[in-house]
Image (cartoon, helix red, strand yellow):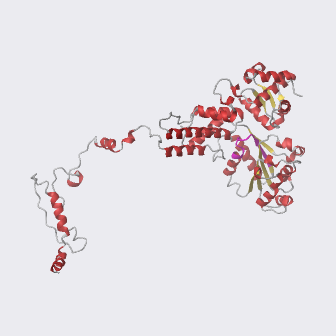
């Protein structure tokens, strides 16, 4: 008990500062062997008794402390630290040596490699892109229709045709997005006819979207009643083909009803849909829609599209430029389908990704290429189009002639030899081509696709075209000599048998 009281009496003296000062003084004893001029510390002035100051008040000042080698020149002396030219170099070389490399290290971890391939495959998707490459003329035509018809409240119709993957829907969506503010007062309805179970199912669907009642007749009353302009976009419009074509006739006649406020845009692959399927429209010139055809993408355009997707993913170096150009050249020679070119490049990336996984699981295995080059693209082309399309020869353009294009060249040569004119109408050429396909039991293409094939042959330098307002009146003629056709086709057997048989009956 007495010891407890004594401790209680000792508490007001606050021994904590003495212990701390002793600790500081213990450090100050080291420089005593060096007899440096001593400076007597001034006695601290008495300070008010506050809890915060009583803990640090007894501490001696640091200025009289003399060190043989100051730990920090700026803190313990009045002299500035000497400048050294080697100090920054030593610091950078010792603390961050990895910044001295000329190029950043490539991602080596499996996770980074996986993310890298995923970003590239996502960029090479075949969905509608955020931005559209080329197609400036087509975009201008669509914008002109919207400005002259829709914004001016003038009813009308536009039919957009082109082979798959030529950017029809993407171009229209791009223009609609650009004019979103201008079209804010327009009631826009977009329907993909591929989702319909039957052609007549389009009427209840449109009635539901337009909040109209009464079925087909109710839609007609709604579209002729006062109100804002209605812009109706029907993608894959050829799916509305019916036995009597009553659905397509009805829809194309809506914009030209009295007091109609409908502007119609139809999209399909067939170039001659309005001529071949809807001949009744030709008898009523006021009901004829404006026509806009999307030609197949050229080699340069396909290359730009793929490169733009790679730039978006910051992966320009993953695909060799020669591989991209090779893919674009082959696809443009067959269909000019941008989606097909993107899909081929994506599948080539998947091949390299699979090789990388095998290499990671077997370190002793043979090293695989970490970039997409010609072998990977040629392998995919072989799977998609056949072995002949995968030929890497850069010689004549005829090494990859598809059968349909060969048949067209043979038909044109037959017509030229059996006629007086060297310029043949597309309608006549397609007629002979269809008979030849039936004779040889080969599935042919429609007149719209036939024009696309002729455009591809024109890009090869074999055909020349003189466009007309109506596709069937387009003139087609050879751009090379007849004797050079055999060398261009590289198929003497097929050409000889067709020419020997004459015009098909």
Expressed as whole percent of the image width and height from the top left, the position of residue 361 reads 50, 41
Mark yes or no: residue 12 visible.
yes
Work out which quarter of the rendered image holds the C terminus and state it.
Answer: top right
Q: What's the residue at 36%, 41% (across, down)?
A: 97
Question: Is residue 281 depicted above or below 7 in this figure?
Answer: above
Could you tell whether 318 is left or right of 42 in the image? right
Instruction: Check the picture and name the quadrant holding the N terminus.
Output: bottom left
Q: Position of residue 109 (x, y in %)?
A: 47, 44
Residue 428 in the image, given as x and y percentages of width and height = 86, 31
As drawn, is 291 to the left or to the right of 116? right
Q: What's the magenta region?
A: 157-170
Q: Is residue 176 above or below residue 417?
A: below
Residue 241 in picture, x, y percent from top left:
83, 47
* Outermost residue to the top: 483
Q: Identify which residue, 250 or 236, lies in the foreground.
A: 236
Q: Is residue 191 left or right of residue 416?
A: left
Residue 299 visible at all: no
Tell me which corner region of the image, top left, top right, bottom left or bottom right, holds residue 271.
Answer: top right
Q: Nearer the viewer, residue 210 or 33?
A: 33
Was residue 159 drawn as part of the magenta stretch in this picture?
yes
Q: Residue at x 80, y 44 (%)?
A: 290
Instruction: Please check the rendered image and state whether residue 227 is part of the magenta-colored stretch, yes or no.
Output: no
Is the residue 302 above or below the residue 284 in the image?
Answer: above
**7 on left or right of 350:** left
Quarter location, residue 413: top right
Total count of labels: 0
């Amino acid at each position: 008990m007495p010891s407890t009281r004594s401790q209680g009496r000792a508490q007001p003296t606050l021994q904590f500062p003495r212990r701390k000062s002793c600790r500081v003084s213990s450090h100050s004893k080291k420089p005593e062997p060096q007899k440096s001029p001593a400076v007597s510390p001034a006695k601290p002035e008495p300070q008010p008794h506050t809890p915060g100051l009583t803990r640090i008040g007894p501490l001696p000042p640091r200025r009289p402390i003399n060190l043989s080698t100051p730990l920090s020149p700026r803190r313990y002396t009045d002299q500035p630290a000497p400048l050294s030219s080697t100090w920054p170099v030593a610091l950078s070389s010792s603390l961050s040596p990895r910044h001295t490399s000329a190029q950043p290290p490539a991602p080596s971890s499996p996770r980074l490699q996986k993310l890298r391939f995923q970003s590239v495959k996502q960029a090479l998707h075949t969905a509608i892109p955020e931005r559209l490459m080329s197609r400036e003329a087509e975009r201008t035509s669509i914008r002109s229709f919207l400005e002259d018809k829709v914004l001016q409240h003038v009813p009308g119709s536009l039919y957009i045709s082109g082979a798959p993957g030529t950017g029809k829907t993407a171009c229209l969506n791009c223009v609609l997005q650009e004019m979103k503010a201008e079209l804010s007062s327009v009631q826009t309805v977009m329907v993909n006819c591929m989702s319909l179970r039957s052609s007549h199912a389009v009427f209840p669907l449109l009635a539901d979207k337009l909040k109209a009642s009464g079925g087909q007749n109710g839609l007609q009353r709604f579209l002729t009643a006062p109100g804002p302009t209605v812009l109706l976009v029907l993608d894959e419009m050829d799916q509305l083909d019916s036995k009597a074509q009553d659905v397509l006739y009805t829809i194309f006649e809506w914009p030209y009803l009295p007091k109609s406020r409908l502007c119609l845009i139809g999209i399909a692959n067939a170039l001659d849909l309005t001529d071949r399927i809807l001949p009744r429209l030709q008898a009523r010139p006021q009901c004829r829609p404006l026509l806009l055809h999307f030609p197949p993408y050229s080699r340069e355009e396909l290359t730009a599209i793929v490169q733009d997707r790679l730039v978006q993913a910051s992966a320009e170096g993953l695909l060799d430029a020669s591989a991209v150009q090779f893919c674009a050249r082959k696809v443009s020679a067959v269909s000019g389908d941008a989606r097909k070119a993107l899909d081929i490049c994506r599948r080539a990336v998947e091949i390299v990704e699979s090789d990388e996984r095998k290499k990671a699981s077997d370190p002793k295995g043979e090293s695989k290429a970490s970039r997409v080059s010609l072998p990977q693209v040629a392998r995919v082309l072989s799977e998609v189009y056949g072995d002949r399309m995968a030929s890497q020869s850069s010689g004549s353009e005829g090494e990859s002639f598809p059968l349909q294009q060969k048949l067209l060249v043979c038909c044109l040569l037959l017509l030229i030899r059996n006629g007086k004119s060297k310029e043949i109408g597309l309608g006549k050429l397609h007629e002979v081509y269809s008979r030849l396909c039936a004779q040889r039991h080969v599935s042919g293409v429609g007149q719209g696709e036939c024009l696309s094939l002729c455009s591809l042959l024109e890009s090869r330098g074999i055909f020349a075209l003189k466009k007309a307002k109506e596709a069937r009146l387009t003139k087609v003629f050879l751009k090379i000599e007849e004797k050079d056709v055999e060398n261009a086709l590289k198929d003497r057997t097929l050409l000889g048998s067709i020419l020997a048989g004459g015009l098909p009956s």
